[in-house]
Image (cartoon, helix red, strand yellow):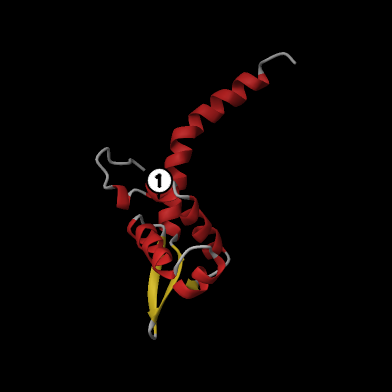
Amino acid sequence: MRVPEAAEPSRDPFAALGDPMRREILTLLAAGDRSVQEIATTLPISRPAVSRHLRLLREAGLVTERPEGTRRIYRLHGDGAQAVRGYLEHIWGSAAARFTLLAENTPH
């Protein structure tokens, strides 16, 4: 995955992951789909703040939402997480291979 140099911060998954509260929301969603209210009851921030974090995570492609009556239900977006993982594997893959080669060929 190539990350555009002039990516909008709100659409950049790495910018979205930079906030600890958004990472906590992703951890909650890893356990299953949740509404804004369900997320807000477990975090020390307001419901509107949770909604703002979810909007940024959605714009970054890390979560999706679906309407369910008057509520919005959020879930992890597998494609977004896979894109981040692919990017990190691309960047760190060759470095990890070089480190392994060096470690295996260094006398202990």
Identify the residue at image location x=50%, y=72%. Answer: 34
Residue 61 drawn at (x, y percent): 37, 57
Specify whether 70 is left or right of 45: left
| Residue 58 vertical placement versus 36 (above, below) | above
Q: Position of residue 82 (x, y in %)?
A: 45, 52
Image vertical order of residue 69 relative to residue 57, above or below = below
Outermost residue toward the right in this view: 108
Q: Residues within 10 Å of mark 1 (few under 14, many from 20)?
A: few
Residue 20 position, x and y percent, is 49, 51
Q: Which residue is mark 1?
A: 14
Residue drawn at x 46%, y 56% as measured from the top left: 22
In front: 105, or 21?
21
In the rendered view, does 21 fall on the left or right side of 5?
right
Q: Pinpoint residue 28: horizontal percent, then vertical percent.
A: 55, 63
The quadrant of the picture occupied by the N terminus is: top left
Q: Residue lying furthest bottom in this view?
A: 69
Q: Secondary structure at mark 1?
A: helix
Q: Along the horizontal axis of the image, is 35 left or right of 56?
A: right
Residue located at (42% from left, 62% from top): 63
Residue 58 picture quarter:
bottom left
What's the amino acid at mark 1?
Phe
Q: Nearer the viewer, residue 40 or 46?
A: 46
Q: In this view of the protein, which residue sits in the foreground, 17 or 77? A: 17
Q: Quadrant of the C terminus?
A: top right
Q: Residue furthest top?
A: 107
Which residue appears farthest toward the left when viewing the image?
A: 6
Q: Can you tell which quarter of the image residue 50 is in?
A: bottom left
